[in-house]
Image (cartoon, grey):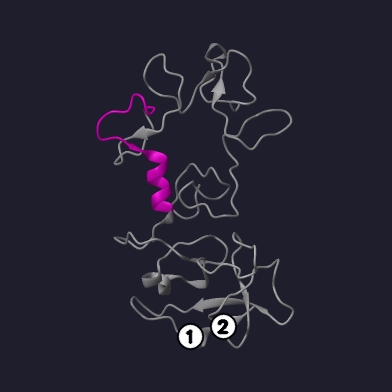
Amino acid sequence: MCDVCGKVTAEYGTRCAKHKGHTHKRTKGLCQHPDGCEKVGWYGSKRKGQITGRFCRSHAPRGAQLLNGGCEVQGCSKQASYGLASIRNKRFCASHKEDGMVHIGDLLKKERTQCRTDGCEEKAIYGASRMGPTHCSDHADDIIGTAIDFTQKCTEDGCKRRMAVWGDKSQPHDFTHCDAHKLPDQVPLKKWHQRNGPGVPVDTTKMIYV
C-alpha cells in the first residue's frame, strides 16, 4: 500500500506510480526471466490460464500473447496507451483510440511534474531531500523538512545532468556543485523550510548545514 495516498497497488516498494521518488524502483509486475529483468512483464499464455503477464517483450517465449495492458480491440496486439482522463484507464492503442481520449502516460507524467498544491498547475521545482520536485516556487514554504531547489545544476564545465547540493557556507542560497565535483572548502547546503502556517514565507534564519 502506498504510504502517501493509501493506494493498494504500491508498484514501487512503498509508493505508487504517482508518488514514487527518484530512489524508488519498481518491485511488482516485473518480468520473471530466470536471469532477472527489471522490465515489466506484459506477455504470457492464455492457454495456461494466465491472467497477468509474466515476461517482457524481450524474454517472452514464442507464441506468448500480450495479456495485461493490451488494446481492447479484438485482434490488436498493440499496447494500450489511451483512455478517458476522468477514469485514467488505458484501453486502446493510438490506432483505435476514441474521440476525447488522451495518452494516459503523458497525463500522469504531467501531474507528477506539477506542483502538488491543490489547484496549482505550475511546474514543481522544489522537493524534500532527494525525492524529486513536488512544489513550485510559490508553494515552497509548504514543504515540511529539508528542501532542495532542483533547478540548480552543477556549474562544472561538462556537467549538465547532476544536481548541485554543495556550496559556500557564506552563501547558503547558492548551490554550485554536485557530489562528484564539489570543491574542498564547500559544504553540503540544504534549505530548511519551517512551515508556521499557510502563506508564511520561508524563514531564512532557519538555514542549516548538514
Whether residue 104 is in magenta: the answer is: yes
Q: Position of residue 129 (x, y in %)?
A: 56, 67
Q: Which residues are magenta?
A: 92-112
Tell me which label, 2 or 1, sits earlier in the chain: 2
Residue 140 against residue 162 in the figure, above or below: below
Q: Which residue is mark 1?
A: 204
Please give left or right for residue 11 compared with residue 105 in the image. Answer: right
Q: Position of residue 14 (x, y in %)?
A: 55, 50
Q: In the image, what residue type sits under mark 2?
A: Pro
Residue 209 against residue 35 in the figure, above or below: below
Whether residue 120 is in magenta: the answer is: no
Q: Which residue is mark 2?
A: 172
SS at circle 1: helix
Q: Position of residue 157 (x, y in %)?
A: 65, 67
Q: Quadrant of the C terminus?
A: bottom right
Please give left or right for residue 169 compared with residue 4 in the image. Answer: right
The residue that appears at 52% across and 66% down in the rendered structure is 150
Q: Quadrant of residue 179?
A: bottom right
Q: Residues within 10 Å of mark 1 (few under 14, many from 20)?
A: few
Instruction: Give whichever of 164, 41 is nearer the camera.
Output: 164
The residue that appears at 55% across and 79% down in the rendered structure is 174
Residue 74 against residue 143 in the figure, above or below: above
The residue that appears at 60% across and 41% down in the rendered structure is 27
Please give left or right for residue 36 compared with residue 2 in the image. Answer: right
Q: Quadrant of residue 118?
A: bottom left
Instruction: Give whichever of 162, 117 is nearer the camera.
Output: 162
The residue that appears at 72% across and 28% down in the rendered structure is 34
Q: In the image, what residue type sits under mark 1?
A: Thr
- Give yes or no for contact between labels 2 and 1 (Cβ–Cβ under 8 Å): yes
SS at circle 2: loop
